[in-house]
Amino acid sequence: MCRSIRTLRPPYTETVTEDDVRAAALQYVRKVSGFRRPAAHNAEAFERAVEDVAAATQALLSRLTVRGGAPDAGR
């Protein structure tokens, strides 16, 4: 679906920044909404969706266990 979103978990990516997570969230919301930039009347909903997806992404990454190791709580 979102080919430009890269995998953000080890071993594909060793370090993940907030910018990486936000970029992935932004790409997802753009794809789902069909808007690259929303009109002014949709901007608040669009930005809130990006924030929500970024938060869910951070939560997911912090809970994943990769190759039998413990979750990486430092993300």
Image: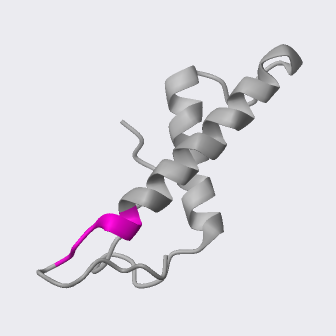
What's the residue at 58%, 42% (across, down)? Answer: 52
What's the residue at 70%, 29% (across, down)? Answer: 46
Query: In the displayed structure, would residue 15 be above or below residue 9?
Result: below
Q: Is residue 58 magenta?
A: no
Where does the image place residue 55, in percent across and percent down from the top left? Answer: 55, 52
Query: In the rendered view, does 5 fall on the left or right side of 54?
Result: left
Where does the image place residue 38, in percent across and percent down from the top left? Answer: 76, 24
What's the residue at 27%, 80% (across, down)? Answer: 11
Query: In the rendered view, does 64 fall on the left or right side of 24?
Result: left
The answer to which quarter of the image holds residue 40 is top right
Q: Residue lying farthest right?
A: 40
Residue 5 appears in the rendering: no
Query: In the displayed structure, would residue 66 be above or below residue 47?
Result: below
Which one is in front, 25 or 52? Answer: 52
Q: Is residue 63 magenta?
A: yes
Query: In the rendered view, does 58 fall on the left or right side of 64?
Result: right
Where does the image place residue 70, in percent across and percent down from the top left? Answer: 24, 83
The region drawn magenta spans 61-66
